[in-house]
C-alpha cells in the first residue's frame, strides 16, 4: 500500500483540514529513528489529528520496543500507521496494534462483503462459529482483528463511514484487553 493510498483512506474518515501527516519512510527503522519519532510525537500540532505514517521494510526488536511507550499512550488525537514487511513482529507490539494485511482477503476468517450481505441470524451464526474456532485455537485473535479491519475498510468503500468508525472503536477495545471478542463480534453483526 502506498503512502498516498493510506492518506486517501484517512481522508475518508476525517476532513483533510483536520489532520497533519508526518511521514517516516525508511528501509530499516533504527533506534535513532524511534527517538526522533518520540520527540516529534509530543510537539504541538496545528490540527485536531496527527497521523504518523511509518513505513519501514525492517523493524528490529529494539526499535519495536522503543515504540511501545508512544503507541501505548499517544497524545490525544495522535495515531500511528505502520506499514512493514517485517516478518517478525514482537507479540507486545502486535498486542498494541491493529494488524491489517492488504495483500488479499483469502486468509480472512470471512469475507467482509459476504458477512454484510447475510441476514442477521446468519451473521450471528457465523460469529458463533468464529468464536468456537477461536476457543479451539483454530484461528487467532489477530485473524479476527484482520477481519474487523477489512470490514471497516469495506464499509468505507460502501459509504458507511459512521459504521466503519464504530467497528474501529470496537477494535480498539480489543487491543486494550478490555473488550470481549464475543461482545465485539456480536455488536458488529447487529450493526451491519
Image: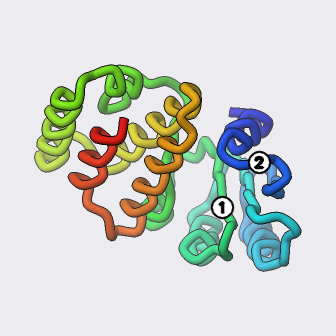
Q: Left or right: 114 with respect to 25?
A: left
Residue to which mark 1 is pinned: 79
Q: Left or right: 141 with respect to 136?
A: right
Viewer-closest of 68 and 175: 175
Q: Earlier in the sequence, mark 2 or mark 1?
A: 2
Local secondary structure at mark 2:
loop
Whether residue 101 is visible: yes
Number of numbered discs visible in the structure rendering: 2
- Number of the label disc, if any, that sits on residue 15: 2
Q: Nearer the viewer, mark 2 or mark 1?
A: 2
| Residue visible at 18% across and 27% down in the picture | 122
Quarter location, residue 66: bottom right
Viewer-closest of 182 and 28: 182
| Residue visible at 58% across and 77% down in the picture | 73
* Residue 93, position as x, y percentages in the image: 50, 63
* Residue 110, position as x, y percentages in the image: 31, 28
Image quarter (top left, top right, bottom left or bottom right) of the C terminus: top left
Local secondary structure at mark 1:
strand
Whether residue 138 is visible: no
* Residue 136, position as x, y percentages in the image: 11, 46
Viewer-closest of 32 and 39: 39
* Residue 183, position as x, y percentages in the image: 24, 55
| Residue visible at 80% across and 50% down in the picture | 26
Crowd rating for badge 1 (residues with CA inside 10 Å; few <14, some 14–19, many 20+): some
Amino acid at each position: 500500500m502506498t503512502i498516498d493510498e493510506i492518506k486517501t483512506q484517512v481522508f475518508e474518515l476525517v476532513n483533510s483540514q483536520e489532520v497533519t501527516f508526518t511521514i517516516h519512510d525508511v528501509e530499516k527503522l533504527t533506534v535513532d529513528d524511534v527517538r526522533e519519532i518520540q520527540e516529534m510525537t509530543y510537539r504541538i500540532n496545528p490540527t485536531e489529528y496527527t497521523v504518523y505514517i511509518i513505513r519501514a521494510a525492517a523493524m528490529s526488536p529494539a526499535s519495536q520496543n522503543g515504540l511501545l511507550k508512544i503507541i501505548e499512550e499517544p497524545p490525544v488525537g495522535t495515531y500511528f500507521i505502520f506499514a512493514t514487511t517485517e516478518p517478525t513482529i514482537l507479540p507486545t507490539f502486535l498486542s498494541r496494534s491493529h494488524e491489517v494485511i492488504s495483500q488479499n482477503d483469502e486468509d480472512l476468517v470471512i469475507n467482509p462483503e459476504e458477512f454484510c450481505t447475510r441476514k442477521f441470524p446468519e451473521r450471528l451464526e457465523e460469529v458463533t462459529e468464529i468464536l468456537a474456532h477461536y476457543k479451539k485455537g483454530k484461528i487467532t485473535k489477530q485473524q479476527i482483528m484482520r477481519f474487523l479491519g477489512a470490514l471497516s475498510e469495506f464499509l468505507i468503500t460502501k459509504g458507511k463511514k459512521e459504521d466503519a468508525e464504530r467497528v474501529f472503536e470496537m477494535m480498539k477495545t480489543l487491543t486494550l484487553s478490555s473488550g470481549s471478542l464475543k461482545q465485539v463480534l456480536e455488536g458488529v453483526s447487529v450493526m451491519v
